[in-house]
Amino acid sequence: MELLQQFFERHKELAYLEVQVKQAIQVIVQAFRNGNKLLVCGNGGSSADADHIVGELMKGFEMKRNLLPSLQGILKEQYGERGAMLASALQQGLPAISLSAHTALLTAVSNDLGGEYIFAQQVAGYGKAGDVLWAISTSGNSVNVNNALMVAKASGLTTLGLTGETGGDMKPFCDVLLNVAGSATAGVQELHLPLYHLICRLIEKEMFG
């Protein structure tokens, strides 16, 4: 892929992850094509990254994604001019959910069960075999993230980890591990962003290009 080659020419410090990046794209694209979904989780800055990833997938990122013609036709047929406006304005989304985004649910689980279960509870509720969990932790040692990975593995989800150099405790729970060089939180996050942007761009290209 030309885009992949250009990326690793610009980011030589990430070139050793080329195989893993291709694997990550493959498993997420396969899930979407099979009618499954992507769950994403992380704490703090990684929570913001989870939201960011979902934002790139649930609407057009670099491409305008027209709604499925069948849905466009139904909207126009049932709702006339207003339906035509919806058919023209809306874009085809890829089903991705940030597990960091539901404040009432997060606080309920934290209060009633404990903060270490906030993501695992959602994986138990949302997750189905064939889905993908994308777990983000700069250290790889976030207990609530790793609990979610364990539930995901037990439930038949494919697991993708985005972390720092060692992989930390999440390493054995990840089918695909993207472990960027570095251990300092800020430095790891600086490498996470271009990497997940690349993955989102290539997923979009595969699905709509």
Image (spheres, grey):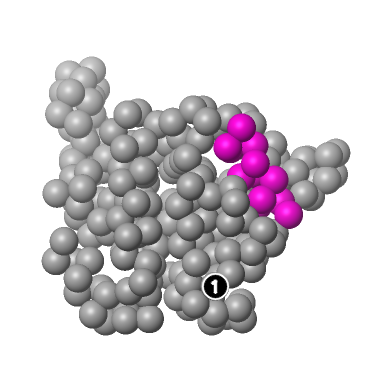
When asked about the image quadrant of residue 91, the answer is: top left
Q: Residue at x 46, y 62 (%)?
A: 178
Q: Is residue 11 left or right of residue 70?
A: right
Report the residue marked by disc 1: 165
Q: Start and end of the magenta stretch?
A: 143-154
Residue at 38% x, 81% y: name it: 13
Q: Is residue 152 magenta?
A: yes
Which one is in front, 186 or 159? 159
- Circle count: 1
In what element is the residue under mark 1?
A: loop
Horizontal placement of 200 versus 104: left or right? left
- Quadrant showing the N terminus: bottom left
Residue drawn at point x = 85 percent, y = 39 percent: 112
Q: Main secondary structure of the magenta part?
A: helix
- Residue at the top extreme? 78
152 to 5, vertically: above or below? above
Of residues 58 and 189, the one nearer the viewer is: 189
Q: Give percent across and percent down for residue 137.
A: 60, 62
- Is residue 16 in view? yes
Question: Which residue is painted at 58% across and 37% down in the image?
Answer: 153
Answer above or below: position of 5 versus 169: below
Disc 1 marks a residue whose amino acid type is Glu
88 w.r.t. 75: above or below: below
**Foreground residue among 88 and 32:** 32
Residue 151 sits above or below residue 191 on the image? above
Is residue 81 something that shows in the picture? no
